Image: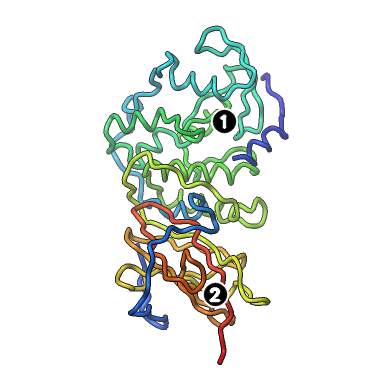
Amino acid sequence: MHCTMLATAISLALCASGAAGFTEGLPVAPTALQVSDAPSDGYPPRGITTGRALLNTLVKRAPEGPEFREAAFDYPVVGPHGCTTEEHVLIASASDPTMSSPCTVVKAQWPAVWDMHVFEDPAEVDVAHLVPLEEAWHSGAWAWTPEQRRDFANDLTNSLTLTILSTGSNEERGSSDPTHWWPPYFGVHCKYAQEWVRIKARWNLSVDPAEYDALMIQLDEAETNMCRNIPIGVPPLGLDPGVGPAAIVGAVVAGPPGVPFKGMTVQAYDADQSLVRETPILLEGDFELTGLPPGDYTVKFLGGTTGAADQWYSAAGPGGPATVIPLSAGRVASGIKAGMTAVVTP
């Protein structure tokens, strides 16, 4: 096998890269709430979320549909320059390619992130769907139109849907989801989980319960690879509208001197000012309000016993009118931040 370890290059590539009701013991939203439609900003930046929050926007259900038909995906197709989708990915992923024709690479260097190797022989690499076609089929693609399946299978919008795998890894993985297969190197498991979830979110694909658990274990990992704290981009939808629950993510970015974030909570209220979700602020200040039905929300931060004053999220800053956060199905509102102030005593 003509391959060489290229840890430095691979490392650089990695670096670049149902609402529950609460009715007892909780404060009631004020009846005269002043609201604003000002756009949200803050931390995480708009368009950035966490793997956990994005995973929780996916519909969770068992695999379904009729027997898998690979031909139903119309892959690969010939693009406007005469190359197939597969040929395009091989060319775009290659470094210093030697071409025998406009669409054929006979020699190059292909960094295979999931294998942590660089391959030079095209016979040693496969262009693979990160979410295999059979997995996508049983996650909802069986019910798509032929055009939607074609668009998914040939998606060149970003470098996520189609990836370079060694032929050995691709054969070993088959159509397995992360319940049964992970890349051989632990160091890329976080990135693999993030990209798997991004693809499923982009295409409104479901996750089965075991798959969800396997992904959440990795995305919530905070001891070795710190996956919990690695942000990811919210993908543009390949199918619109979304279908899963929505989420609101952000952080308390400042507080009174000496006041810990632990002990604070954050709440989401719907347009009727009914409490829909509450979650504690993590030690680092981050929070995720997940499992939200579509609708308009306001967010309230509670200081609890920490000595910080309660406040509504406002794009205008502390004390401003509460900002309304519109959420559609399967989407994430990010950048919802608060700078907590101390309780004012008479």
Q: Kindly identify the residue that appears in the image at 71 percent across and 29 percent down.
A: 5
Cα gap from disc 2 to disc 1, whole angstroms: 45 Å
Q: Image quadrant for the N terminus?
A: top right
Instruction: Give the amino acid type for the residue marked by disc 1 in the picture.
Output: Ser
- When asked about the image quadrant of residue 155, the answer is top left
Mark number, residue 41: none
Secondary structure under tag 2 reads loop
Q: Against 302, is 38 above or below?
A: above
Mark 1: secondary structure: helix
- Residue closer to the observer: 152 or 208: 152
Q: Which numbered disc covers residue 169?
A: 1
Point 56% across, 73% down: residue = 340
Say how the picture is coloured: rainbow
Badge 1: residue crowd in 10 Å (few <14, some 14–19, many ≥20): some
Looking at the rendering, in which quadrant would you find the C terminus?
bottom right
Residue at the disc numbered 2? 264
Q: Are marks 2 and 1 in contact (CB under 8 Å)?
A: no
Q: Which residue does the image show at 35% across and 72% down from the upper left?
A: 21
The x, y position of residue 78, in whole percent, is 39, 17
Under mark 2, the amino acid is: Met
How far across and down, in percent of the image, does residue 29 sit? 38, 78
Q: Position of residue 200 (x, y in %)?
A: 42, 43
